Image (spheres, helix red, strand yellow):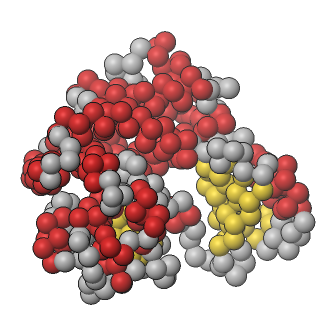
């Protein structure tokens, strides 16, 4: 049975490789103001990497060589456009691609509003540069600085305006990422009529529950219902795949989602810690992020509460979607840490407060 990959079902923004310069394969990555942007260029073909989508050949091959060279060097794989940010830049600043982009992409980075587009793209370049500087990758940070100068030299926006736009928008990006990651849970759905299924349960902002599972034919199926009760009813009507044991298991998993478990106070505290770091990636704010991760990763161990045990997985998924390199640094720096260092007991209690 093929492994059900979490990121493949929740594609937002992506990173892609370049097979023979004909199409680009894209995986998860988040950008401010560009949710689903790269997805609009997808050709919906099978993937080598199951975590995303491919850029259609008619878009990818249209990028001019000088544009590919200019923006393909951001992540260190020189001249190969293989990140979400590189594609966003190339697809907008390519004189050829901008003429043929999907309408949805044009609405997000409007050709007739270059100031707005430059603000969005500049803010994303600035975000990457900030984190790279903190991580000590001066070469990559310098490449981002060069692209930032290219954007401001166009004369539509200033560096100060880009930084202000970034500071004003980063909370929305982090809040939406927390909301999406903490409202989904992956698990092995055991005891079905045809055996066990890899499954993912998500809850949308308007209360729609979607169960994605791999059936006995290795086909991924999505079952969406406007409520948990409606989902249980739909499962009950599908006796080929489900029985009462699996329905009960899905109900249990729904109650273990971090967004269901944690109080609004805890979620808001977590968001604030992340926002403060992304606005000002200082050692002091980084220490708070590390402590927040340790508190969530150790809560299940210290309390033996099953509701906390899912927090570590969800927290790592959240960090990964925001910035994989930063996540790896946090994991390395906290590998021997079992208690918060700078967060006091009162703040800790707010972070793990349950509903």
Give the quadrant of residue 240. bottom right
Q: Please, is residue 121 above or below residue 240 in the view?
A: above
Against 84, residue 131 (above or below) is above
Q: Is residue 246 left or right of residue 209?
A: right
Query: Which image quadrant: the C terminus?
Result: top right
Is residue 136 among the parts visible in the rendering? yes
**Residue 94, quarter of picture:** bottom left
140 over 16 or under it: above or below = above
Q: Residue at x 66, y 36 (%)?
A: 260
**In the picture shown, does residue 223 fall above or below 2?**
above
Residue at 40% over, 49% down: 33
Residue placed most toward the observer, 96 or 330: 96
Task: Indicate left or right for 250 with 346 as reference.
Answer: right
Residue name at image x 67 percent, y 54 percent: 201
Q: Position of residue 305 (x, y in %)?
A: 64, 32
Residue 347 picture location, percent across and down: 46, 16
Left or right side of 183 for 84:
left
**The N terminus: image quadrant:** bottom right
Find residue 99 and report its horizontal and vertical position in percent: 32, 73
Observer-nearest of 21 and 235: 21
Residue at image position (54%, 30%) is: 267
Residue 290 shows in this picture: no
Looking at the image, residue 45 sits to the left or right of residue 112; the answer is right
* Number of marks in the rendered image: 0
């Amino acid at each position: 049975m093929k492994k059900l990959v979490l990121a493949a079902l929740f594609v937002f923004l992506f990173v892609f490789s370049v097979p023979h310069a004909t199409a680009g394969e894209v995986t998860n990555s988040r950008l401010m103001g560009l949710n689903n942007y790269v997805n609009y260029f997808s050709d919906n073909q099978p993937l080598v990497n199951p975590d995303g989508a491919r850029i259609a050949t008619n878009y990818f091959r249209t990028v001019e060589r000088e544009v590919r060279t200019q923006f393909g060097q951001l992540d260190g794989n020189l001249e190969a456009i293989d990140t979400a940010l590189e594609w966003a830049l190339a697809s907008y600043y390519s004189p050829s691609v901008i003429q043929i982009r999907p309408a949805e992409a044009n609405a997000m980075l409007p050709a007739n509003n270059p100031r707005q587009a430059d603000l969005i793209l500049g803010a994303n370049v600035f975000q990457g540069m900030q984190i790279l500087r903190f991580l000590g990758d001066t070469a990559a940070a310098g490449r981002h600085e060069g692209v930032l100068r290219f954007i401001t030299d166009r004369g539509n926006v200033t560096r100060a305006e880009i930084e202000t736009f970034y500071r004003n928008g980063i909370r929305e990006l982090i809040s939406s990422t927390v909301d999406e990651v903490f409202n989904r849970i992956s698990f092995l759905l055991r005891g079905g009529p045809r055996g066990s299924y890899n499954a993912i349960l998500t809850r949308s902002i308007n209360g729609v529950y979607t169960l994605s599972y791999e059936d006995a034919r290795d086909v991924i199926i999505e079952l969406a219902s406007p409520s948990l009760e409606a989902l249980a009813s739909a499962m009950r009507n599908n006796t080929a795949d489900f029985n009462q044991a699996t329905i009960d298991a899905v109900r249990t998993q729904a109650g273990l989602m971090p967004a269901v478990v944690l109080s609004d106070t805890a979620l808001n505290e977590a968001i604030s810690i992340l926002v403060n770091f992304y606005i000002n990636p200082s050692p002091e704010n980084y220490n708070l992020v590390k402590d927040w991760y340790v508190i969530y990763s150790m809560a299940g161990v210290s309390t033996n509460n099953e509701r906390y045990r899912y927090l570590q997985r969800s927290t790592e998924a959240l960090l990964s979607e925001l910035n994989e390199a930063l996540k790896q640094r946090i994991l390395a720096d906290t590998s021997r840490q079992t208690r918060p260092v700078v967060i006091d007991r009162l703040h800790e209690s707010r972070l793990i407060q349950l509903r």
